[in-house]
Structures are given as C-alpha cells and as structure tokens.
Amino acid sequence: MPQVDVVETGSPWIISRSIVIEAPADRIFDVLADPRRHPDFDGSGSVRGAVSGPERLSLGAKFGMDMRLGVPYRVSSQVKEFQEGRQIAWAHIGGHRWRYELEPLADGSTRVTETFDATTARSARALKLMDAYNRNTRAIEETLPRLATLVESEGQ
C-alpha cells in the first residue's frame, strides 16, 4: 500500500496528507473531476452516490451527493477552486473545503495532496465540537490509498 505522508500546514484548521500515485496527473484529475466517481475512492464511507450535476466538474459547477453519517442525507456542493489537471476544491453550505492538488513528478507519477480546509468554514469551532477534524483526518488517510489503487488499476 502506498505511503500516506503528513503535510504540515501551520494551521489547526487545515489538515493535509499526500501520496504518490503511479499515474499521470491528468488521469487522476479526470477521476476527481467526475462526481459520479467520488464514491469509488471515498475513504470516509459517507459518500454514497452522485445525484445531480455535470459529468465533469469545472469552476462554479454545482453537484449533489447522497451521503450517510449515521442517517442518510443529501448535500449540495460547489466547485470553488479549479485549475485543469492540477487543483480542484469544493464546499457545501458549511463553507469548509475539500481540496486536491496534483504535482506531476519527473518519473511520470504524481504527488496528490488532499486537504480539509476549515479556514473558509462558517464555524471552524463548531467543526471541532463535531469531531470533524479527527474524522476527516482518518477519511483522508483512507481516501488517498483508495484513489491510488483505483487510478493505478485502471491504467493497466
């Protein structure tokens, strides 16, 4: 299993981890930019399926997901950051962002950094009370290897 590395952010409101995936950045980005693929690599166990939105995300695109944290619910998110092949981030009504940054490496692999960023949240402190930081740390540490396995297996 690929090694997940801690990325120091200098902020208690931002959690980041990275992994090297043996695939080109564009192929990884294609998976991240397709909301129908999110359940395939989600490590939180909460993303159940895409219910609305475009086949490929872009800046400002809105998409809805079926979710489950104890009970089923739906959430609508909007893409807040987008740089084709390099970066994508989305947020729902809570304002906090999930961000993926892709850095192509000389050997053809890609360093992927996933970030839970609560600096844009409506209430970063409320997230702390809900244990969102610990939950999202565990989710990121499960998501990145799942993304690596998915993309690497599809490239063969």
Image (spheres, grey):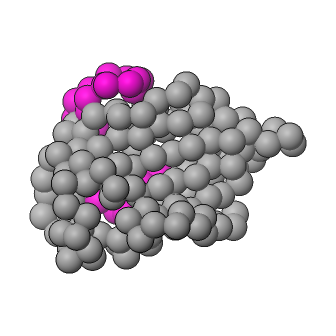
46, 153: nearer the viewer: 46
- Position of 140 with respect to 80 (left or right) is right
Residue 150 drawn in magenta:
no
Residue farthest along the right direction in this orientation? 107
What residue sits 58% from the left and 52% below the top?
113
- The x, y position of residue 47, in whole percent, is 31, 52
Residue 50 drawn in magenta:
yes
- Position of 137 with respect to 112 (left or right) is left
Q: Which residues are magenta?
A: 41-63
- Position of 151 with respect to 33 (left or right) is right
Whether residue 48 appears in this view of the structure is no
- The x, y position of residue 150, in whole percent, is 58, 48
| Image quadrant where residue 5 sits | bottom right
13, 72: nearer the viewer: 13
| Image quadrant where residue 50 sits | top left
Image quadrant in which the C terminus is located: top right
What residue sits 59% from the left and 34% below the top?
86
Q: Is residue 133 above or below residue 24?
A: below
Image quadrant in which the N terminus is located: bottom right
What residue sits 47% from the left and 55% below the top?
115
Number of labelled discs? 0
